Image: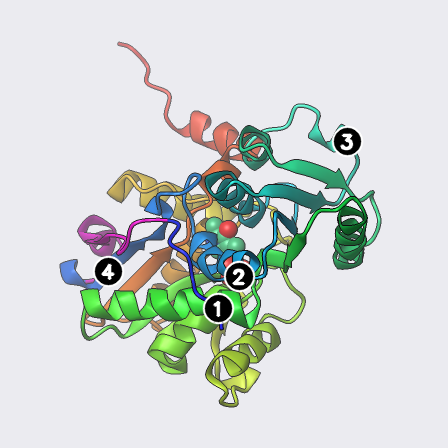
Amino acid sequence: MTDKIALSTWPTPLEPMPRLAETLGLREGDLWIKRDDLIGLGGGGNKVRKLEWTVGAALAEGADTLVTTGAAQSNHARLTAAAGARLGLDVVLVFPGTPQSATGSSGNLVLDSLFGARVFWAGEGDPSALAGVADDVCEQLRRTGARPYLIPFGGSSPLGARGYLDGGKELLAQLADIEHVVVALGSGGTMAGLVGALGEERVLGVHCGAVAEPAVAVADLAGALSRRNHTPGTLRIRMDQVGAGYGVLHEPVLEAIQTAATTEGIVLDPVYSGRAMAGLIAAVRDGELRRGQRAVFLHTGGLPGLFGHTQTVHRSVAALHTYEAV
Ligand SMILES: *Cc1c(COP(=O)(O)O)cnc(C)c1O
């Protein structure tokens, strides 16, 4: 029996987005935003809700070291580092690449070291080998007398997904009559938890290119969570925002980031939340999300990632807003 631990103050705010709604041709009260970017730990973001469960399990097992994997700009890794700092646990992050990959590092990598986490660079090989490397790191840690606990990629185990079963229920208590919840789909735990709380019909996931088979990932996690069968085919998942691939900025995402910023003062990231917003805008344009229906955008955070991709975002934004004195 695992108890979750508190890593922030709940609930997160829910706010209307009237100017964005109007810009998209919707009614003022149609669009809302659930501010999980404002979660109070380590710069915020969706991974904290999962960590409340997985780190709770680590503590229950008597662990003294958290180990996890991800891309170098992983928000999950950054928040694992922050959770470790908060609780006095050591943290080892297993990233692809070499120590040189950290040269001139920015965004999440800076925060990882600020929180005191150590990085094990796994080399340039196949990213799918990372889980094996993380197992080896745990084994080595055990030999030195440490008690490591391995948190899976993105925190997306059935246990971690319970964080969004909680998050979905929290949202339902804040707002009734929700027809759509739009969310970025990475490793799948966030969408799976929301499906558990709100049902398959109301959750629209936007695939970000992080996993090969997003529908299978979500169906498996949702099934394990609810002990009911979920088939990949009945989940609502938009596959149209991957562009050139995970982490590569494409035009609709840049447009979505700019639209949210200029209409609502909301900052999205280029890898996840910007893609989710691009998916929401596409859903309005093709009629999947209609005027008079109530939709909630789940802001999953990721702001530090924006500063890990400054070149592309800044170049285009700077070009747009030059003020010429007359
Ligand atoms: C990880 C992440 C997601 C995706 O969540 P999953 O549970 O992995 O699908 C979305 N947005 C941000 C900012 C993230 O860091």
Which of the two labelled residues, at mark 4 and mark 1, occupies the earlier sequence position? 1
Q: Are marks 4 and 3 in contact (CB under 8 Å)?
A: no
Residue at the disc numbered 3: 99
Three-letter code, disc 4: Leu
Q: Amino acid at mark 1?
A: Thr
Q: Callout 3, which amino acid?
A: Pro
Q: Name the residue furthest top.
A: 326
Upstream in sequence: badge 4 or badge 3:
4
Crowd tier of the residue under label 2, counting other residues whose Cα lies within 10 Å: few below 14, some 14–19, many 20 or above: few
Q: Magenta stretch: residue 269 in it?
A: no
Q: CA distance from mark 4 to mark 1?
A: 36 Å
- Give me the C-alpha separation between circle 2 and circle 3: 33 Å
Residue under circle 1? Answer: 2
Expressed as whole percent of the image width and height from the top left, the position of residue 28 reads 15, 58
Which residue is labeled 4 in the image? 31
State how far apart marks 2 and 1 are (Cα).
7 Å
Residue in the image at 54% along x and 50% along y: 76
Q: Earlier in the sequence, mark 2 or mark 3?
A: 2
Q: Which residue is mark 2?
A: 60
Q: Is residue 11 magenta?
A: yes
In the image, residue 192 lies at what x, y percent? 48, 72
Residues in magenta? 8-26
